[in-house]
Image: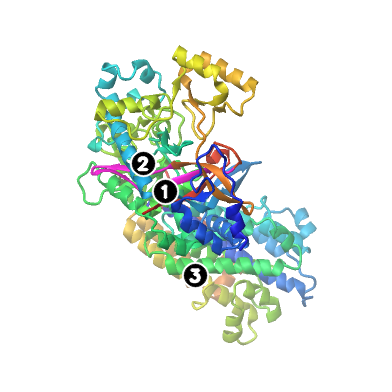
Amino acid sequence: MLSRVADSMFWMNRYMERAEGLLRVLLTNYVLSLDKGPYGVHSWRPVLETFGNLSDEEMKQIEYSSANTLQYLILSRANSNSLRSIINKARENARGMQDHITKEVWEEVNLMYHTVNQPGLEKKLSGAEALPSIDKLLKLSLTYVGVIDTTMPRGMGWNFMNIGRLIERAVLTADVTYKQFEQINFDLDDHKDILYWRNLLLSLSGYELHMKNYQGSETNMNVLHQAIFNHHFPRSAVYSLSRTERYLTEVLEENEPPQKQMIYREFGRIYSRVKFADESSIKQITLQRFLQDTKQDLLKFSHVLGQQFFSYA
Amino acid sequence: MDSELLIQNYQTGSALFDEMQNSGQIRLPYQKLVEELKQHNIADLHLKHKLAGDLFMSQGITFTVYSDDAGIERIFPFDILPRIITAAEWAHVEKGIQQRLKALNLFLKDIYHDQQIIKDKIIPAELIASCPHFLHEVAGIKVPHDIYVHISGIDLIRGEDGTFYILEDNLRTPSGVSYMLENREVTKRLFPDLLSNANVRMVNNYPLMLHNNLMSLSPRPVSNPTVVLLTPGIYNSAYYEHTFLARQMGIQLVEGRDLVIDNHKVFMKTTSGLQQVDVIYRRIDDEFMDPLLFKPDSMLGVPGIMGAYRKGTVALANAVGNGVADDKAVYAYVPAMIKYYLNEETILPNVPTYQMSNDDERNYVFDNMHKMVVKRTNQSGGYGMLMGNKATEEEMRLFKDAIIKSPREFIAQPIIQLSTVPCFIDGELKARHVDLRPYALCGPDGIKIVPGGLTRVALKEGSLVVNSSQGGGSKDTWVID
């Protein structure tokens, strides 16, 4: 497989995964912002910090306005992480390797692109049609995952696509979990009620799973367990990493790159640190450090992969 | 049915050849189509028109127009009514194009080796010497099976009496074949019953034929040679076509940066190291192919690829240097080539062409400028043209000055009123001028032409310029038995 194509596969899926994560966070926050919640007026600040690059001053201006926030996070061309920017990049990657993805996959990415670039979307997002519009976009990104799963051949491209998707997912989970714990100073001993955690759990699409599986009053610890350590939860960090390991092994065994052992070790370090962590080891280095390091190491690892397989040098 | 009116209101120019209607009567090949149209009302046709646009958009069959820094994607306008050609007309076109390509291939071999045609004074040496597309760099290179023009798209028009003429030879990197194939796919959805009842010959084996031809060029005697399609990249206006053909043939779509030359062999960079490439279907123009030999600042090509080509470790389709054969001034000599190489009479005539370097012909053109179309020999896509019947005195004067300055860079032809066909425009049937570009493939076992081609249509009323860059669209083209 061409290095350039492997690179596009990896990034197309990273962007599409990011788009789905962003849309789910937007949908959750939008719905919650309509209620007067137990924690005062809803602020978009945590979301803006995760998916934007605004100064403190600029954030103050829009954090209480859903319309302005959606405008910035979905349509803004100045925000390199807005949905429009992400989808444009995903499509550019898809276009550059159309002969390696199925026609169905291409049409799905293309449809998403045309939907997010349609002229009327701005007006819809600032009015009563905001919710159905976000909903529709989220459905499209879910369809994309289904189309990939049912039409893409299981070869080298598939492996790179999945590594891209899973690394992005682990990073996203670490990110939104970090934001939610940051507001309570990363306190693991406190017991915030479920209403507080609803935002995070819904953003990860894990609210129902939580209600079914976690009883008891240790809410903070339970939420952390689900987001990081629960092997049955498809958005947990450990699940994403265990799947990444599988695809990475196939890539390394088939291509035999010169740095094979180094890549194994790099990934093994990240994976085992998450896999074998527990309450006391996290408290030792603080939860903040733990989440930050996990994210940083994954991004570094993505860079190592790029140098090994995708570089044009 | 209001569509009865559609047919009744169809107006054709009195002096023109209309392919559907002859003095108020519907011609035989179009009768089934007309019957079908009568089954639909105008709202139906509008729906079909919209459906066609949506299909092109959702599949990404677009070209990008740049304005205010934002790339706007446009679809290539498509008219829902097919253009119909009879089996007898097609047989004539097919024979004519095969004859022409045979001669042009022999000419290319000759001009880059012995130049016998110049020694025998059939073609003046200065005409070739002054052709910017004649490349000394490829003289003497032996190409597999002596085939130079593997893929061609020769443009034809029909004149006032219905005669087919050759308008120009595109022997370098002709595009549009993907539109021919996609137009047919869209028509299947618009008029499913009609298509199956009308005995239309199929076109969709083109990619298979092309793939087989490309495989047969492999310099290495392996059963499964590596064939790739080399594209300039996603910003090229024909990029959709490149991906389409690569996908249909199941070959890799590569860019210049994916390829590297080692010891005069071409390799592509893959995740598991370098892999040798045997055949390259290139969609990059000659001058961008190799920065070591041609344009030194080209980022699209591969440094050193011409060395590998000369060594014969890699085959290129089309051959490099074909531009000398489709130069607009050399065009006038193609009938002479047919006589010289094949000893045959030309089946498909040229449009009469005046050489500006000849004093008598130039004076004649200057005296009759309003009846002439003047073209620059080194430009395509409908640019650099003067339509004498529409030009102002000032424009004519400018062109005359330019011609006197460098006569070799211009040719002139009498304006031919292209034939018209019906198009569905703004809820009515309107007659519009068309040309025809059939796609021929030359392989070791002869020249094959897919029955059909791309019909390009000048959508502006009265316009004779069909190029997409000048507001042209396209139609599905049916050859019926």
The residue stretch that appears in magenta: B437-459
Q: In this view, does B4 lie to the left or right of B333?
A: right
**Real-space Cα distance between discs 3 and 2?**
48 Å
Q: What residue does disc 1 label?
A: B85
Q: Answer whether residue A176 is magenta in the image.
A: no
Please report contact status of discs 3 and 2: CB closer than 8 Å, yes or no.
Answer: no
Q: Which colour scheme is used?
A: rainbow
Residue B114 percent coordinates (x, y):
24, 22
Chain name for mark 3 = A
Q: Which of B6 and A243 is in front in this view?
A: B6
Secondary structure under badge 1? strand
Give the number of callouts.
3
Q: Inspect the image, locate mark 1, and give the three-letter code of the amino acid beneath it.
A: Ile
Q: What residue does disc 2 label?
A: B93
Q: Inspect the image, locate mark 3, and give the three-letter code of the amino acid beneath it.
A: Gly
2 or 1: tag closer to the N-terminus? 1
